[in-house]
Amino acid sequence: MGGATTSNSLTFLLSSRSNFLALGSLIASPTNPLILIVWGHGGKQGNTPVFHVRGPRITPADFSALAHKTGSLESYWLLSFRGSGLFAAKLAGVHREILSSESDTMFNSDPVEMSLILKSIREAPAISFESFANKLGLATAEWYKERNLARTEEPTLWLPNQKPQLLAVSSEESALSSVDASAKSSVKATNEITREITNSKPAVDLSAADLPATWKELKRVDPQNYPDADAIILRKNISYTLAASPAVVAESGWISKAFMSIRQASS
């Protein structure tokens, strides 16, 4: 494999798609469960989610190809990057347990959970994968809550033959991709009130005689006097004169002003 170096029992490879796909040759006859930790930066190329490495990006299909080579080997996948939930959905299957930093929504920020992952492992290195995932979900929710931040990741556990489990959901907060139930109720109530107001009849039927005196001074303008105008603005000016006798004199008058919109001709 390109650029591989070995130190004791560890093999270091350059981060490339070709090396990732060649990992299957290293796990031909394993005796222990396989653990894969993928941490970095994800994104999209067109509509395809990708994991960023040098050169060609790694796609969910590449993950599936590697997983297929493991056969019936028990494997544990820890995916911590943007779009990891879309990768996990392709990986999910028998003999695989997957913990992704997202579910079905790709956020705009990289996850912060890696520091929480390391802390959890140090505190309980012998913990089961499922218990570790639940602990991480609670720690992630608490991390955002302590900082009063909207959560931009959705730790999700994918177990064989089960629906994905959202691990950071609580009654007090939710991710940006979720809609709070109380908010839905509030919107529904507001819509019902608006509908009642719209459909209700006015309590008082105002006629022209009931209008203020100022409204009676309004006169309809003749459109023919403004052939090039898109609208007419009616404005009232009131002038006050301060004097000795009388002390205050008010004069008012209505002014009609044509309004024309500016259009740019297209060639």
Image (spheres, rainbow, N blue to C red):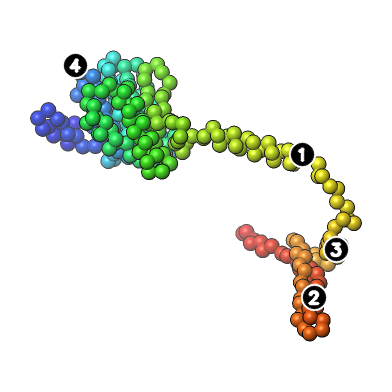
Q: Which residue is mark 2?
A: 250
In the picture, measured across the screen, residue 103 lies left or right of residue 17, that is right
- Which residue shows up at 43% across the image and 21% down it? 163
Under circle 3, the secondary element is helix
Q: Tell me if mark 3 has few (under 14), some (14-19) or many (20+) residues whose alpha carbon lies within 10 angstroms of its own.
A: few
- Circles 4 and 3, Cβ within 8 Å, touching? The answer is no
The picture places residue 212, in percent across and down from the top left corner, at 84, 60
Badge 4 crowding class, 10 Å Cα cut-off, few under 14, some 14 to 19, many 20 or more, is few
Disc 1 element: helix
Q: Do tag 3 and tag 2 residues touch (Cβ < 8 Å)?
A: no
Nearer-N-terminus badge (1/3): 1
Secondary-structure class at tag 4: loop
Dot 4 or dot 3: first in sequence order is 4
Q: Nearer the viewer, residue 245 or 249?
A: 245
Q: Amino acid at mark 4?
A: Thr
Residue plotted at (77% across, 73% down): 238
Q: Position of residue 260 (x, y in %)?
A: 71, 64
Q: Tell which tag, 1 or 4, sits nearer the viewer.
A: 1
Disc 3 to disc 2, C-alpha distance: 16 Å
Residue that label 3 marks:
213
Q: Is residue 82 above or below residue 162?
A: below
For residue 199, the mark is: 1
- Label 4 belongs to which residue? 31
Q: Quadrant of the N terminus?
A: top left
